Amino acid sequence: MSGMNKQGRPTSFAESGGGAERTTFTGNKGLELEEPLIFERDTKGACGVDLDEPEGYQPKIGKFERKNRIGLPGLSEPEVVRHFVRLSSKNYSIDAGLYPLGSCTMKHNPRLNEKMARLPGFGDVHPLQPEQTVQGAMELIDTLAHWLKTLTGLPAVAMSPKAGAHGELCGMMAIRAAIEAKGEGEQRRRVLVPESAHGTNPATAALLGYKVDTIKGDGNGRVDLEALREKLGPDVAAIMLTNPNTCGLFERDIIDIAKAVHEAGAYFYCDGANFNAIVGRVRPGDLGVDAMHINLHKTFSTPHGGGGPGAGPVVFSEALAPFVPLPYVVQKDGVYDLIETEDEAEADGTSPFGRMTAFHGQMGMFVRALAYMMSHGSDGLRQVAEDSVLNANYVLASLKDVMSASYEGPCMHEALFDDRFLKGTGVETLDFAKAMIDEGYHPMTMYFPLVVHGALLIEPTETESKQGIDLFIATLRDLVAATKSNDKERFSGAPHFAPRGRLDETAAARKPILRWQPEMPAQAAD
Ligand SMILES: *Cc1c(COP(=O)(O)O)cnc(C)c1O
């Protein structure tokens, strides 16, 4: 079959589902080059370096020496370089264009952060170095910790968690430790989670053995305070609530929610993934939050989404501070010290619930986050929140006459639409999103949150220009108009112009090909 590679993937334009008539001899589309797997590029014996056979070499492992080929592909250096450069150009990224993925805060990653993270004193440190040789690195962790506590109005922080979900686990483990310290571990087995929550919230609670109990919304995208009150009781350990929530709305009853939760003897875990909307404006500690993770890779601009590891420090209230996990940095008379063992913690007057990671967290992300904070200053961080909310409201206001906004009134840093505007067009949320790819946009978050049908959650972030957002809005308006035309192919066949057309997602999930297999040598018939 021409235009199919050995794995059965289409390589020509038409067969990629594009529906366009033209195919090319090479499978390339203009200067966008087709690229097979590196194993398919294998030239037996090819190598990027030319090394002499070592003279007088005696293997020290005797009969265990490998005799067969290791199975790595053989390529020259330029072939390797081209392979990875071609693949990288197929990856959409925030450096390429607007990335409106709701709940993910895909903002520009300032290059200053990268420069700071590459300073050898930060970039080359090793977690097992003697403490006296990494005083600067520990000062940086301590300084970042200081600003995270200041911005959230909470007295303690665990720096080591490596992502938002990992931070949730850390926060909930501290809550469990506090409950056990009060002797209520057996009794408090239930965790309340609003129906709009990110999937990681119920997953975290379930992982720790808690029973997840869903609280329904008030019909306006927020938690129903009365429904929450009815669910509270002596068996509730905590509530896990996102604020601003995943519908892009501020929970107006947040103080009453916190009060009710505390009166029931439970703790308030806040999912802080949406902190970007309120950073520098609202301190979660003032709202009654007991623990909250901060996605440094969202609010504080460290790269994510294939661009780098995350970091999810967790801030804690006075009640939970004693249980903050190991290790943590302390400072005495200008000297930084790591509290790494239970004995050291006991001497420091704390009782950590354990530890989350082998070492101290994502050092490179700490450097980037602190560089971001310091280069913005307090006025700049406040402006981040204000501009992110302004941009999202601009999108909401510019589209709500043609797309169906899910809730009344202004939003926070993301605008939520649902699929009512597609009713009767035969176009689904998924088709609409795929058509956006043809226009050069990464789609928004789709089908999340689950509380509205066919959700489209748009988060432009503060780093997009008005010009850029205007073009995005105009594109969506054009697409909405097209849903009402006869040009259904624009949607059902989309993406037409991407390196790959629409994939058979069901087959990919049911019969995944996870590993390249070498072609079997032809067997002699017997
Ligand atoms: C991103 C996100 C998380 C999880 O954070 P990760 O860093 O991806 O683990 C949790 N909750 C919400 C609301 C999020 O947007």
Image (spheres, grey):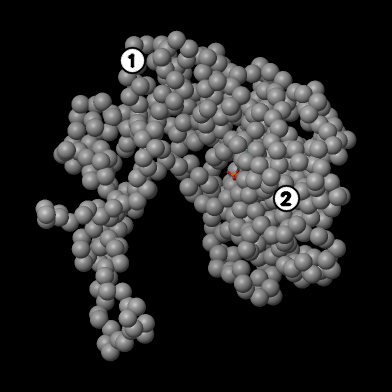
> Which residue has dot 1 on it?
487
Point out the image quarter for the C terminus. bottom left
Which amino acid is tagged 2? Met
Looking at the picture, does residue 511 appear above or below residue 39? Answer: above
In the image, taking residue 212 as reference, residue 55 lies left or right, namely left
Can residue 353 be seen here? The reply is yes
Q: Nearer the viewer, residue 179 or 525?
A: 525
Q: Residue at x 70, y 38 (%)?
A: 211
Q: Residues within 10 Å of mark 2 (few under 14, many from 20)?
A: many
Between circles 2 and 1, the one closer to the viewer is: 2
In the image, taking residue 258 as reference, residue 117 lies left or right, namely left
Measure how far apart labels 2 and 1 are at the Cα level.
Answer: 53 Å
Residue 212 image offset from top left, x and y in percent: 69, 36
Question: Which image quarter: residue 63?
Answer: bottom left
- Name the secondary structure under disc 1: loop
Residue 81 image offset from top left, x and y in percent: 31, 57
Q: Which quadrant of the picture is home to ligand 1? A: top right
Q: Nearer the viewer, residue 412 or 268?
A: 268
Question: Which image quarter: residue 49?
Answer: bottom left
Residue 470 image offset from top left, x and y in percent: 50, 25
Q: Residues within 10 Å of mark 1 (few under 14, many from 20)?
A: few
Can residue 439 be seen here? The reply is no
Which amino acid is tagged 1? Asp
In the image, taking residue 508 as reference, residue 102 lies left or right, namely right
Q: Residue at x 82, y 56 (%)?
A: 322
> Which residue has dot 2 on it?
173
